[in-house]
Image (tube, helix red, strand yellow):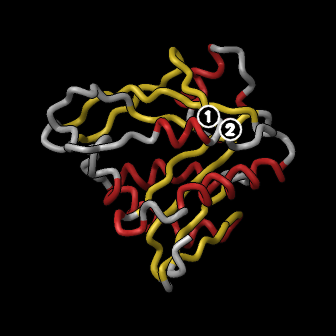
C-alpha cells in the first residue's frame, strides 16, 4: 500500500457525511471507459440514497491526507432496488443472503498500489461480521471489445476479480440506463460476478 494512502471503513450514520464525496468520485471515475458516464448529480443522490438508509451498508474510503481519493461501497442486496434484486430472484437466490458491492472508484494516480485489494478485504470482512450473508456479488458493464472508443492498452479487471475468487455469471445481468458521453441516455447490460463469502481469495 502506498504510504500516502489511508484506508478507513465507515458504517452507520457516519456514511451520510461522505455521500457528496463518493458521488463526486463516481462522476469523475465513471466518465472514463468502460462506463463513459456523463455524470448527473440528481441521479447520484437517488442512487446513493439506498446506502444512506441501509443499516448494513459500508463505505471503504481511501484518503490522501484529508482528501478522499477513492471509495468502495456495499450493502445488503435486499436493501437495493428491485432491478438489482431481480436476477437473483429469477435464479432462486435469496437477496437477503447476498451482500452487494456497489462500486470501487479510485483516482488514476493512486491505482496499482494495493487499494483495490483493500477495498475487497474490508467489504468482505464487513459482510462476514454481519453474520447473515452467504454470497458477495457485484456487477460490471458489458462492452464490445471491438468498440472503437476502447482506449489502447486498456486492461479489464476480469483477471483481478477472478483471483479474488469471483466468477462471472452469464445470464445474470441488470439493465440500467445512464447518460453516456456523446450518446445521451442509453441502456446498458451489467453482468454479475459472485463468490461464496467464506471462500478465501486466491
Q: Which quarter shows the C terminus?
A: top right
Q: Nearer the viewer, residue 166 or 75?
A: 166
1 or 2: mark nearer the eye: 1
**Side (left or right) of 151 relative to 94:** left
**Side (left or right) of 142 relative to 64:** left
The residue carrying pointer 2 sits among few (fewer than 14), some (14 to 19) or many (20 or more) residues within 10 Å by Cα, namely many
Q: CA distance from mark 1 to mark 2?
A: 9 Å
Q: Nearer the viewer, residue 111 or 17?
A: 111
Which disc is residue 166 wearing?
Answer: 1
**Side (left or right) of 37 relative to 164:** left
Q: In the displayed structure, would residue 54 be above or below residue 169?
A: below
Q: Are marks 1 and 2 in contact (CB under 8 Å)?
A: yes
Residue 31 lies, in percent from the top left, at: 27, 51
Q: Which quarter shows the N terminus?
A: bottom right
The residue carrying pointer 1 sits among few (fewer than 14), some (14 to 19) or many (20 or more) residues within 10 Å by Cα, namely many
Disc tally is: 2
Tell me the SS state at disc 1.
loop
Q: Quadrant of residue 166?
A: top right
Residue 153 lies, in percent from the top left, at: 25, 44
Which disc is residue 136 wearing?
Answer: 2
Amino acid at each position: 500500500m502506498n504510504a500516502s494512502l489511508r484506508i478507513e471503513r465507515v458504517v452507520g450514520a457516519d456514511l451520510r457525511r461522505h455521500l457528496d464525496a463518493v458521488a463526486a468520485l463516481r462522476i469523475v471515475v465513471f466518465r472514463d471507459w468502460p462506463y463513459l458516464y456523463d455524470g448527473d448529480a440528481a441521479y447520484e443522490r437517488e442512487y446513493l440514497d439506498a446506502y444512506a438508509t441501509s443499516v448494513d451498508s459500508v463505505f471503504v474510503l481511501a484518503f490522501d491526507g484529508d482528501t478522499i481519493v477513492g471509495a468502495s461501497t456495499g450493502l445488503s442486496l435486499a436493501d437495493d432496488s428491485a432491478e438489482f434484486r431481480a436476477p437473483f430472484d429469477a435464479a432462486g437466490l435469496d437477496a437477503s443472503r447476498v451482500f452487494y458491492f456497489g462500486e470501487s472508484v479510485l483516482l488514476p494516480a493512486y491505482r496499482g498500489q494495493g487499494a483495490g485489494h483493500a477495498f475487497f478485504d474490508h467489504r468482505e470482512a464487513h459482510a462476514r461480521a454481519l453474520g447473515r450473508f452467504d454470497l458477495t456479488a457485484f456487477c460490471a458493464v458489458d462492452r464490445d471489445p471491438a468498440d472503437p472508443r476502447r482506449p489502447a492498452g486498456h486492461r479489464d479487471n476480469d483477471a483481478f476479480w477472478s483471483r479474488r475468487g469471483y466468477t462471472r455469471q452469464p445470464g445474470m445481468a441488470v439493465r440500467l440506463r445512464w447518460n453516456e458521453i456523446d450518446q445521451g441516455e442509453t441502456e446498458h447490460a451489467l453482468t454479475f460476478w459472485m463468490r461464496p463469502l467464506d471462500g478465501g481469495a486466491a
